[in-house]
Each structure stands twice: as C-alpha cells, then as structure tokens.
Image: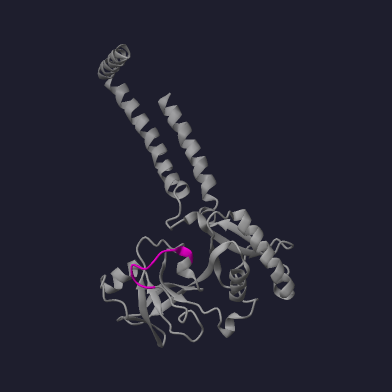
C-alpha cells in the first residue's frame, strides 16, 4: 500500500513538472476538461431535477392522471364531465380519491386597478388528492363544495406576499370578482407546486350544479391518488371496468369511451425525458472526447 501511494505521488509530481514546463498545453487541457465536465454536470443536474426526483408532493408515485378517449376513432384525450368524475370516484376500488380542476382567468377588482389572476376551479377532494395542507387557514368544506354553498378562495403564497404583504391576518379578507366578494379561507405554502404554475387562487366548482349534469359537457382535468401498493396497470384495469359499466348505463355518452391511467410524473415530463437522455448521452461522448 505504501509503495502504491509513493508511486502515485511521484506520478503527480512528474505531471505537475510537465505542465509547468508547457503552460500553453496545461491551459488547453484544463479548459477542455472544464468544458466537458461542466456540460455533463449541467445536463445531469437537469435530469436529476426533472426525471429522477419525484414530484414535490407526499407519496407522489401514487398520483395518476385519468383521461377519457375514444378507442375506435383514436381521438386524443378529452376533459371529463363532472358527473362522470363523480361516477369514477363512487365506483372505483383502487383510488383513495379522485378530483379535477380547470384553469380560468379572473379579473379581481378589490384593488385600485383590476388585476388578472390565474384561477383553478376545483372538484371535491382536491386537497385530499394532493395531500398538501394550507400554510394558513384551511381547505374547502363539503358545504362550500356544493351548489349554492358559500363561495370562497384559497390563495397561493406568492399572491399572499404580493397583494397582502404576508399579513398573517389575511384570513377573512376578500377578493372581488365581478359583483361578488370571495373571502379567503386559506393560503397554500410555496412548496405546493401546482401543475399550472400561473394559478394563484383556487375555488370549488360544485359538481352537483344543474349545469354540471350534462355528461357531454366536459371541462375537468382529472387527477387521482391510488391506494398504497396499487400500480398504474391495476388502476387502469379497475377504471376500465368502471367505464364499461357506465357505458351500459349511459350508452349515448359513455359507450364509446375508454380510460387511460398514467403516472402524473410521466404526463408532466412527457417527451422531455427522451430528449434529456439523448442530450446526456451526447455530452457524455463530449466528455470522453475531452478526456482523450
């Protein structure tokens, strides 16, 4: 062991003497290796952040995206009708909870000038699916999620800081939309990275409203949390069974529909994963060339 160490030290000294005698070559070697290592490290950092790390939610591997489609016509995925979402929730056996959301832009008029704010109208069980509790206040009550119930807002931490200066007494203050004022009942933490990052307020969309009973009116993007130990393929088979039963019960609107179940991370990453791995392979080859 001592002999090996002494040989390594001699080799290092010899390398240093050689580089000192040839400073131009030493600079070229250093810059070349720095570029190769830097490019490789930068791409791997992106892969680690986007592909290797789980989504920033508790037990994020349980989150699934649910999409209806028409197998016979190969139509792309569509949004989900509120009544169909509630049928999936009621009849499935593999999900802890299923919810949905749809984005909107609202004009908030409580300030000196109207302000455009990104809003998401959400179905029941929204916070149960994401498993993120508000930083201040609470989520929505069952009464608020029903048609005719109180209209309330939960706001983002970003909006709380910008509009209310991080005032801890913000609960109960209101945002005005049109002729209505919506009291604020909760503030989400900055760690709640909702898939639509431009959204700053969330409010219930009552699935029992009269206008929500038409199964041909679709607007929800649906996310569900499977039970512990349930795989995406098992959830897929379960929802296929549920949708087949709905097809028999509502042939006009549901008979031609199938359901796709994908891990939410795969949906969010999409085709970016393949591109990043190809880019990583390319910069790895670049690093090998630099080392050579």
Q: Could you tell me residue 135's position as x and y percent?
A: 33, 67
Q: Residue furthest top?
A: 3
Task: Examine the image and state in which quarter residue 22 appears.
Answer: top left
Q: Is residue 259 visible?
A: no
SS majority, magenta: loop
- Examine the structure image and report whether residue 67 is included in the region drawn in magenta: no
> In the rendered image, which quarter contains the N terminus?
top left
Q: Could you tell me residue 110's position as x and y percent?
A: 33, 82
Residue at 41% x, 80% y is 152
Please give the range of residues in magenta.
129-138
- Examine the structure image and report whether residue 137 is included in the region drawn in magenta: yes
Q: Is residue 238 visible?
A: yes
Q: Is residue 38 left or right of residue 78?
A: left
Residue at 46% x, 46% y is 52
| Of residues 67 and 3, the one drawn nearer to the viewer in this rendering | 3
Residue at 39% x, 42% y is 42
Q: Could you tell me residue 64's position as x and y percent?
A: 55, 59
User: What colour scheme was applied to this rendering of the protein?
Assistant: one colour
- Image vertical order of residue 183 relative to residue 54, above or below: below
Q: Could you tell me residue 119's position as x and y percent?
A: 44, 73
């Amino acid at each position: 062991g001592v002999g090996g160490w002494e040989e390594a030290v001699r080799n290092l000294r010899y390398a240093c003497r050689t580089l000192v005698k040839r400073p131009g070559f030493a600079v070229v070697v250093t810059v070349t290796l720095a570029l190769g290592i830097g490019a490789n490290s930068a791409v791997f950092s992106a892969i680690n952040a986007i592909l290797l790390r789980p989504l920033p939610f508790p037990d994020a591997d349980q989150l699934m995206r649910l999409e209806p489609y028409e197998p016979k016509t190969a139509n792309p995925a569509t949004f989900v009708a509120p009544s169909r979402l509630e049928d999936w929730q009621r009849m499935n056996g593999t999900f802890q909870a299923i919810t949905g959301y749809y984005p909107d832009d609202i004009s908030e008029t409580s300030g000196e000038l109207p302000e455009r704010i990104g809003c998401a109208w959400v179905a029941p069980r929204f916070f149960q699916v994401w498993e993120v509790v508000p930083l201040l206040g609470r989520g929505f009550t069952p009464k608020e999620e029903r048609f005719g119930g109180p209209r309330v807002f939960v706001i983002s931490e970003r909006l709380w800081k910008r509009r209310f200066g991080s005032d801890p007494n913000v609960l109960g203050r209101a945002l005005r939309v049109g002729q209505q004022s919506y009291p604020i009942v909760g503030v989400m933490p900055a760690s709640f990275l909702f898939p639509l990052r431009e959204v700053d307020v969330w409010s219930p969309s009552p699935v029992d409203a009269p206008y929500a009973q038409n199964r041909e009116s679709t607007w929800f993007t649906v996310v569900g949390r499977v039970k512990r130990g349930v795989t995406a393929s098992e959830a897929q088979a379960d929802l296929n069974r549920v949708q087949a039963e709905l097809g028999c019960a509502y042939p006009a609107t549901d008979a031609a529909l199938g359901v796709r179940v994908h891990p939410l991370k795969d949906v969010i990453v999409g085709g970016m994963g393949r591109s990043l791995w190809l880019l990583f392979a390319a910069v790895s080859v670049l690093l090998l060339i630099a080392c050579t």
